[in-house]
Image (cartoon, coloured by chain):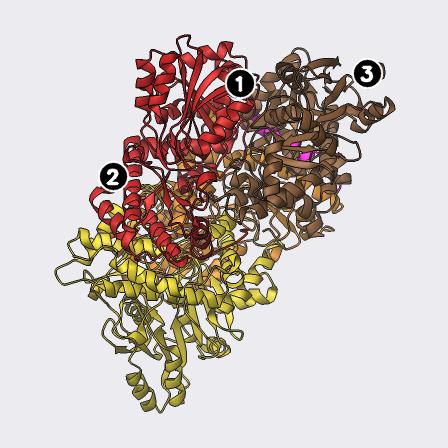
Chain colours: A orange, B brown, C yellow, D red
């Protein structure tokens, strides 16, 4: 049963949830089983281990929590911080805003470094603040790697450099919800202490898993952190890891088999390096299309270009919400609306997860149609052609078919 | 497990098998059940009845046979004809050729009216032959409604007119494999005696059901037809219809639930009239794209334009097989190759079944890329733009979302 | 891919997760969709509304949270209580123990009323404590309706009577994880303030939804409760309910469609009254089997008999863990082990969710075999016969097949 | 959507179609793909090759035809015989009767050797007839290996001995529909010329594949056989085998992936030898149950015992149809009715395909209940106990779980 059925496939180009590929649907098409049987830990251990590759870590400990990205945020914060702790956080879009809101509600003392929506994190200010913090009162620096509302990716290597140059021991906490598994992520190299993502983004799974990796330093901090936590407490996981039964409470059997299938697609079939290259290729194609349409993207500088989501700024006389509406009503295309400060001003094209060139070109064609339907005089085919030109050059033969 | 995996969705644009929509996959996702239980006939009767709407008939009797189109052909011929019977059949492509081959092998005496590949049935010759057949020795006229190899649709109303004008009592047998459920089909109005299709075409199901409708006149002929037949014998079905248990041998439970879901999508959710309109819209868009590419289609006259498949003629120096190959290897796009006389000369774009505008535009973009990859200097975006222009005008809002 | 494959179906008789029926698997067999599209709230509202029927409430507000039962517990406590609040909680098994552990860790001041494992809540002591609490310092009474570790169901109407007789305004918080949707539950009638369950129990879904209902009094309490909460905060849900977009963060599309299918099975196809009657029938049959085996159940008095799980006490010389082990290794039967105080002493037969008579009889036959395999001289067929005798009398014709 | 829904799993114990296991459902849960792409032959070749193991042949050629068992029969007969050919066929039940009916309708000259229903093939008479056939006018001997209507398995080694002792060159054609993949089958050793089965039996797949193996001698005979055939013509397959594209017409993609999964379960996970041992174990248990009920089975001598289906004879005052009816209406248990000569006199328990001990015991418990419901005073638990006693001894630990 579908509520507003339409012929053909849905074109899902919101920046998450993303398309679930058939191998994942197949893997999840199963009844429940006993998660306390001798069989289940075998699967559990394999995903707990392999998921770390997406984070670029061999040193961290992973936690796969039956929750969403919001829960993963809460897990990251409450396990390493105590109420009243000073933290620095960057604000440059809706999801950084929501995380900061959570930080405040969890009673941390947040020093917000704000940038314009469309800009990335202001690292100069971070540098100043950290250098001035002689007493090392700042316990953590929190940053959203890829801001989904504006299509801005921050340079985490640069963040690490600032921390290192200031010789500041603050923990580095990273929201990688719309980046990990799609963009290069090097947790060990960048000395990230807590990184997290959700299953419904680059992993192309249903919503329901919050995946958190904690560095040895973060695990150490967790021993003394005083934030109240039970459901999100890593200690319970660590206890059951030792026992070998892995789960402190009932996990979703189906989601874990799905995760196994998703990891196989990413790590074995395509290869993580090819996955990130594909994301870059599709993102570049999208940006070229936007340019061909005579429009700007929300991202203010190329250094912040996001390879998972592109926020397109519409001309002032057009309401971006109408673009999204007509795309859904006429072309079965789901785009992301503009949120908060950019509501009505941008619409967003998600190009994340299990996706390929022709799916994107179909969606770009749909954006062109929708733009014209709402009165913006885009030349039909112009963006598609620009994207095609890039993709023709940049797309390799499919590895298994050479 | 997939044999040559690739990221993202497969773009399946062969003229069958077609994309299976999620509601059909869901309906088929079930174990076996007892087809002799009191429950099963309820489903069976509903599909036997409703499938007739696709054929445009209330008078005919339908048979849903666990076979393919080839088997449905054999069922049509052997139930109404006797060995040695004179029949007239049209030859204008690979599938009409294969059917004629079957006729010959089944020992009918076939008078073949040949046209060029790309042309439709030569009705003038039919008229002559029938008019000259004073003794009514011709027992049947056989025609492929839509020739899948060349993208040619014949005018069945015109065929009927020829029969009527010749006052000839021959049975009219129609292969509607790539037409019924996608193109207008009026079995009762056109006085078609046997019409047939397969599940993997307009119905967007897996292969496995041959669906045959027989007019009262055909059923009458079946009583005396001497062709040997057991598996394909309608009489066995009619016997079990009377008994109420419907099936002379074990049917595929899953396929029948899938058929129910497919009929619901076509007849209830979208509406058959909207389905054929959608096929026309997508086909027109495809033809406009081909024109924009500076290429011809195989179909020689607009009156024969097919709304389910477009056969594109490539320039002499290009092997159409290479277009198909690179599309699959680089873009995960499946196109149909040229068959037999047009091998190497045409490739085919299927636009049949559960499909929408942006899926087609993605595929057309992929064709452009593939054409350039093999050295044909198509302007990227040109065909997409031409198709978009048509679709923007012709596409209505999705009925459920207005 | 399965990790320890075995021919035939798995016999899943742990007290959760339970068997997922085919209609639910079908409903969940779908890709992601945009939860912010106009379509999704239609589904969301229907399940938010209908789920209340399982709780026996029209007055409460429901929250469907992407979490487990443990998270639902945390949601219940933190939304209505403040750190340091005095609460009374009953301890009589592993799950009441774990909930109390959570209460302590969330910094509530828990007054524990302990009973033996196998007994129900000690209501006499509750009565004394409440009567003595002139200042109404006790803010909440917390009780596990059905203790899954011992097979004990408490009489919630009696709990309410104690509260009423003491004229005590404490909130009544109920863990209905292994009861709601399987046992009679009358939230409004019993004036329960917060009740909760998880998707993987009576609803026969995968794990992943914590379902919480809050009375108007609970919602009122939530306005002033000072426990820190973000992910589990009802206020965020209420805000999005008002906005009509329902979800403060991304829900699991698949789980919500699955919940819709499960509610349809329970409320429409079978009828809630028939569902609880079926649970009682299967539980009675199980208890009669245990008696025939010459064994005792953990539950000390018939008034506490659980209709969702039966904990069977093995003779002292037998390790119940071995029964569970051989059942899995030889018969593909999953039983629940004894937990904590009853580890090694009991094994548990879950008979909850979408289950029927012959599934249970097969499992009981398997228990007999396993008991003999570990050396307990049960008469083969004895328990099955006792269960059959009850079921033959008590089982009605299947409603749809009369 | 189900037509007569009931809680819990359906207990499918008809002798086909059989239960489809989850790994097969998962493998089949996929959209269509292009069967003419370079990828598909890889799958096709693997199943065409591996299916031969079920037949016990390395010398034969296999054909996987989109049809049912009835179609597979027709394929076997028409490819090696010419109209008017003399053949000997055995009649001892409904399916041997139906095959003979087909032989007659296909215009072969059938010499029927009849036995009572419940007996096996009369080999003494065969011996006489063959010995008397000095001119070798008999072209083929046709036998149903396992007669599904009476639960009779014939000794094919003995049939071969008769042929060899008579030094008769007749082809040996075997219907293995309810045997191959479940019972020992040694096509090469027994010099069977054509053997066939259907997907919905031992393979535990949906209906839709007729699987036929032909010996080199059968392939030789096919070159001159004059029976008219097109859809069922092996020559078309052989032609496409040579071309490497395997399929003369569109195959069912889903069924072939399902077949791959089923073969993996049988050949790799469980092992064919263990599969046949399991069938024997379950059948023995069933026969012991019947004996304990004080009833007879239809099979007249132990040498003919069938390990895939047991036909139970009810006392004269009972209509076996009522047993089947109440089993379905009250216990969601599907049994096979008595067919033709044994209608009303026997009901049948299928124990074929992907099935285990506790599933069978649940069904046997259901049979007991149903027998009592219709007035036969069976002692509840008696048959279950007898079956359990056998199974406890005979069931090994599950290989993957030792």
Query: What separation in Å lies between label 3 and label 2 (alpha carbons)?
Result: 74 Å
Disc 3 or disc 2, which is closer to the eye?
3
Query: What separation in Å lies between label 1 and label 2 (alpha carbons)?
Result: 42 Å
Q: Which residues are magenta?
A: A377-394
Q: Residue A393 is drawn in which quadrant? A: top right
Q: Is residue A351 above or below residue B196?
A: below
List x then y, in percent, for residue C284: 33, 66
Disc 1 or disc 2, which is closer to the eye?
1
List x then y, in percent, for residue B360: 65, 34
Report the predominant secondary structure element of the magenta stretch: helix
Q: Chain of mark 2?
A: D
Q: Is residue D267 above or below residue C246?
A: above
Query: What separation in Å lies between label 3 and label 1 (alpha carbons)?
Result: 35 Å
Q: Is residue B230 above or below residue D315?
A: above
Is B320 in front, or is C184? C184
Crowd rating for badge 2 (residues with CA inside 10 Å; few <14, some 14–19, many 20+): some
Q: Residue D306 is drawn in which quadrant? A: top left
Q: Which residue is mark 1?
A: D233
Which residue is outermost to the left?
A: C317
Is residue D103 in sight in this rendering?
yes
Res. B135 mark: 3
């Amino acid at each position: 049963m579908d509520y507003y059925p339409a012929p053909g496939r849905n074109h899902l180009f919101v920046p998450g949830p993303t398309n679930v590929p058939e191998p994942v649907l197949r893997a999840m098409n199963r009844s429940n089983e006993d998660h306390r049987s001798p069989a289940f830990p075998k699967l559990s251990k394999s995903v707990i281990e392999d998921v770390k590759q997406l984070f670029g870590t061999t040193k961290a400990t992973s936690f796969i929590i039956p929750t969403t990205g919001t829960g993963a945020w809460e897990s990251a914060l409450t396990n390493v911080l105590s109420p009243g702790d000073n933290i620095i956080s960057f604000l440059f879009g809706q999801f950084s805003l929501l995380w900061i809101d959570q930080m405040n509600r969890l009673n941390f003392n947040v020093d917000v470094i704000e940038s314009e929506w469309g800009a990335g994190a202001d690292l100069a200010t971070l540098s100043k603040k950290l250098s001035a913090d002689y007493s090392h009162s700042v316990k953590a620096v929190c940053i959203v790697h890829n801001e989904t509302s504006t299509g801005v990716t921050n340079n985490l290597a640069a963040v690490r450099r600032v921390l290192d140059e200031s010789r500041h021991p603050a923990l580095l906490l990273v929201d990688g919800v719309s980046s990990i598994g799609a963009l290069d992520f090097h947790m060990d190299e960048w000395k990230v202490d807590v990184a997290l993502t959700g299953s419904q983004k680059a992993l192309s799974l249903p919503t329901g898993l919050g995946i958190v990796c904690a560095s040895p330093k973060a695990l150490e901090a967790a021993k003394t952190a005083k934030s109240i936590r039970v459901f999100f407490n890593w200690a319970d996981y660590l206890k059951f890891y030792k026992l070998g039964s892995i789960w402190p409470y009932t996990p979703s059997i189906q989601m874990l088999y799905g995760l196994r299938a998703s990891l196989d697609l990413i790590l074995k079939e395509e290869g993580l390096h090819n996955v990130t290259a594909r994301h870059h290729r599709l993102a570049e194609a999208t940006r070229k299309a936007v340019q061909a349409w005579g429009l700007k993207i929300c991202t203010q500088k190329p250094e912040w270009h996001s390879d998972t989501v592109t926020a397109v700024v519409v001309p002032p006389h057009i309401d971006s919400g109408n673009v999204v509406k007509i795309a859904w009503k006429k072309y079965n295309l789901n785009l992301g609306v503009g949120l908060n400060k950019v509501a009505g001003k941008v619409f967003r094209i998600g190009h994340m997860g299990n996706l390929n060139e022709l799916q994107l070109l179909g969606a770009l064609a749909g954006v062109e149609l929708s733009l014209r339907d709402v009165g913006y005089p885009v030349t039909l085919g112009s963006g598609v052609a620009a994207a095609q030109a890039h993709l023709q050059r940049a797309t390799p033969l499919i590895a298994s078919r050479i």
